[in-house]
Amino acid sequence: MNHADENRTGQLARNVAIALRFKKSQGTPEMPQVEKEILAPGYNRARGGSFHLAANARDQDFSHPGMYLRAAIPDRVDIIEEVIAEGDRVGLLFRVTGTHTGSFFGVPPTGRRIDVYELALLRIVNGQIVEGWFMMDETGLLKQLGARLPPRGDGSSVAPPLPKSGEDADAYAQRLASQPEASEQDRRKFIVARSRGATRSKADRAADHRFTRSGFMHMREYCALHGMGDLDLDLQTGIPDRRDRIDVMIEEGDHVWMRYSTSGTHKAAFCGVPPTGKRVGVPVVSIMKFIGGEWKETWSLADELGMMLQLGAPNLLLE
């Protein structure tokens, strides 16, 4: 487990301990008591990890995968890779691993092993979790299971709503830049925010910057496999008015985490899907690492299944 700051103390250390206790208790006999103690009475699970699989299963007769998916994946083990904390927020990056032996929101048991990423962003106030926001690599999960999104009885497709929260990335960056005495923390946040602005500046990245994971990884692989060229160019032409809005920014140690949404109009062919004229928009979480004051690495996870549902092609990347 990699902590953004191995030496955090005080309230940050207490918040991290609460977040880890919550995560590690899941699936154990201690879980009901732990949740009783650390989940606030009005706890808001703003977004579940298997958001689209759950939405697709709503009002259907699919078997429920159980609490924290453990009826579908009874040997589930989560491997926590990254932990970050700032203010009242704690971020966790972990891998969901296990064997698919039960119905998973309509996907029949496959007996296959899974190993997919999930992110949690938690708000902790007065020692209790008041909000939880989660996002799993659902496209990666379905690909590992060799499955498609289960068809609904009514033949409909449940596309997610367009994001409405957050602050325009340029406005966010300008607000940071206008502070009279910006800290090193603010400087890093400004650099990251500016990279999501209208010009999508890459000038602040180190010369040897590398992407350890692309947010739209599965789309990128699909485009490469089918000879469609570079996904970045496909995005620029397919969604030319694309803009980003920043919801959450957390900085600790050498790491900056950012949750934002990317939205625009599908005006030209994108990832093999002919133009629909529809507005599309999904959440993305990026993890940036700075070394010696330079932005060296970026790891991202985007809601690819959500975007394909909005484009009317939910199973395209699973073919």
Image (cartoon, grey):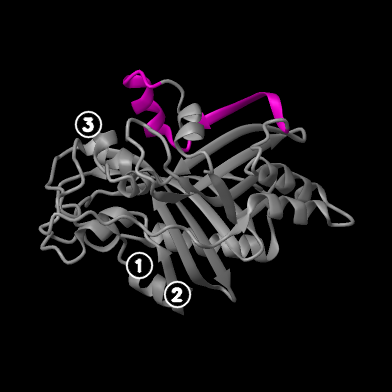
Tell me residue 112's x, y (percent).
19, 37
Tell me residue 76's x, y (percent).
28, 49
Residue at position x 84%, y 57% in the image: 179
User: Residue under circle 3?
Assistant: 319
Which residue ends up furthest to the right in the rendered image?
Answer: 180
Say whether disc 3 or disc 1 marks the residue closer to the N-terminus. Answer: 1
Residue 59 horizontal side relative to residue 229, left or right: left
The part of the image, by quadrant, that contains residue 95 is top left
Q: Between tags 2 and 1, which lies in front?
A: 2
Question: Is residue 315 something that shows in the picture?
Answer: yes
Say whether disc 2 or disc 1 marks the residue closer to the N-terminus. Answer: 1
Query: Contact (CB < 8 A) between labels 3 and 1?
Result: no
Q: Secondary structure at mark 2?
A: strand
Q: Nearer the viewer, residue 54 or 24?
A: 54
Residue at position x 42%, y 20% in the image: 229
User: Residue under circle 1?
Assistant: 31
The 10 Å Cα crowd at callout 2, few under 14, some 14 to 19, many 20 or more, is: some
Q: Which residues are magenta?
A: 204-228
Residue type of the residue flagged with mark 1: Met
Residue at position x 52%, y 38% in the image: 240
Q: Between tags 2 and 3, which lies in front?
A: 3
User: Residue under circle 2?
Assistant: 43
Q: Distance from label 3 to label 1 (Cα)?
A: 38 Å
